[in-house]
């Protein structure tokens, strides 16, 4: 048995509604859990007032302003078992409206995060539909402010692909059923079992670094396909983030999510979203297609930036 004082300490911070992200985080953690030289702790984030699952439709829409503006919620945290410092923190989060989910953004704004993450290597783990670039930018800004050291990013996205998951993922969170839906026209939502299992390779790379003399730095996950970037989503994410931000300001000015004014506004916003989807989305797709030969170098640069630090 390894002396507990010499063990490498790893903390997994996670929040998941269906348990999918928790399974991804546990898959990454498996090689660490099986190594006697590593002490592994888990910190589940529990909002004092639970978010619903499945989501009632208007509540789902009405959550975007607080998500986009990262308005924190109260968390009930069990912290008695935590160490004062860790050699690595694995932060597993799902994306809500191109931002980290509210429980995770709340954690990142807490005193506990300031204590646990300062001067500490962090690996982020994301499992979401497929739009995570702007959420990771927000998480990067928090980590920078907290003095944490982002050494890797692991991303798993829904297996159905961009178009099908546009229907499959909302149907999953609104009905609680993964699908298939509509007589098989909409395939099942979520990350594939193969990808969940395969995430152990990232944990193995982390374990090897932690238990060797090699530094735990930004090379740790390179070459493992940890963060594939879909460059077609870069522009759409930028436009949607701006829209969530501006509309979000209006919503927040009308009060809390349960205030009377917010419900009709949410219905109006749904119409606006639908209108955007049938107009702006195809127009930007055509523009991107027309200009992509001229933008190749710029897009490649952006792709490399968003794939960092782990690489595509
Ligand atoms: C309110 C809400 C907003 C979401 N927004 C996004 C998003 O902007 N981008 C994305 O890729 N997935 C989005 N998703 C999907 C989640 O990231 C995630 O895949 C899904 O909620 C299942 O997570 P879980 O199994 O860990 O609970 C959203 C889900 C919810 C509930």
Image: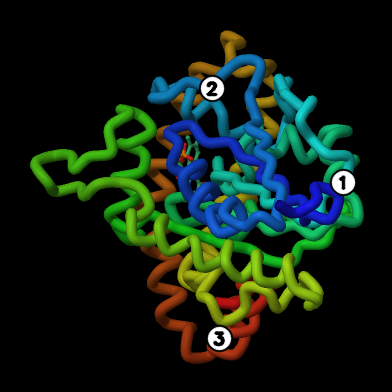
Beta carbon at label 1 within 8 Å of ligand 1: no
Which residue is more in the foreground, 41 or 310?
A: 41
Q: Nearer the viewer, mark 2 or mark 3?
A: 2
Which residue is more in the foreground, 291 or 88?
A: 88
> Residue at image x 61%, y 11%?
259
Mark pair 2, 3: CA separation: 41 Å
Question: Eyeballing the image, is 259 above or below 70?
Answer: above
**Residue 296: image x %, image y %?**
54, 88
Which residue is more in the foreground, 241 or 119?
A: 119
Q: Which residue position holds label 2?
A: 51
Beta carbon at label 2 within 8 Å of ligand 1: yes
Other-residue count near label 3 (Cα within 10 Å), few / some / many at <14 / 14–19 / ≥20: few
Other-residue count near label 1 (Cα within 10 Å), few / some / many at <14 / 14–19 / ≥20: some
Q: Which residue position holds label 3?
A: 295
Say whether disc 1 or disc 2 marks the residue closer to the N-terminus.
2
Q: Which mark is residue 85?
A: 1
Q: Nearer the viewer, mark 1 or mark 3?
A: 1
> Residue at image x 54%, y 49%?
25
């Amino acid at each position: 048995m390894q002396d507990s004082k010499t063990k490498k300490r790893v903390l997994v911070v996670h929040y998941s509604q269906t348990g999918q992200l928790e399974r991804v985080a546990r898959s990454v953690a498996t090689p660490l859990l099986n190594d006697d030289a590593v002490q592994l702790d888990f910190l589940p984030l529990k909002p004092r007032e639970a978010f619903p699952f499945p989501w009632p439709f208007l509540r789902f829409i009405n959550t975007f302003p607080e998500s986009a503006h990262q308005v924190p919620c109260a968390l009930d945290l069990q912290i008695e078992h935590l160490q004062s410092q860790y050699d690595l923190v694995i932060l597993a989060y799902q994306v809500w409206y191109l931002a980290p989910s509210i429980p995770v953004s709340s954690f990142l704004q807490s005193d506990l995060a300031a204590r646990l993450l300062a001067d500490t290597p962090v690996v982020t783990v994301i499992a979401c539909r497929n739009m995570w670039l702007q959420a990771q930018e927000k998480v990067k800004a928090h980590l920078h402010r907290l003095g944490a050291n982002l050494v890797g990013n692991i991303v798993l996205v829904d297996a159905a692909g961009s178009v099908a998951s546009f229907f499959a993922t909302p149907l999953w969170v609104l009905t609680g059923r993964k699908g298939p839906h509509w007589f098989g026209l909409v395939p099942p939502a979520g990350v594939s079992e193969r990808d969940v299992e395969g995430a152990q390779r990232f944990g193995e790379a982390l374990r090897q670094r932690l238990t060797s003399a090699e530094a735990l730095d930004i090379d740790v996950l390179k070459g493992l396909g940890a963060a594939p970037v879909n460059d077609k989503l870069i522009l759409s994410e930028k436009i949607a983030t701006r829209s969530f931000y501006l509309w979000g300001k209006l919503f927040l000015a009308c009060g809390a999510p349960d205030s009377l004014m917010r419900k009709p506004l949410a219905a109006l916003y749904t119409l606006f979203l639908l209108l955007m989807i049938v107009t702006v989305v195809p127009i930007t797709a055509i523009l991107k297609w027309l200009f992509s030969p001229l933008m190749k170098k710029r897009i490649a640069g952006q792709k490399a930036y968003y794939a960092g630090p782990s690489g595509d």
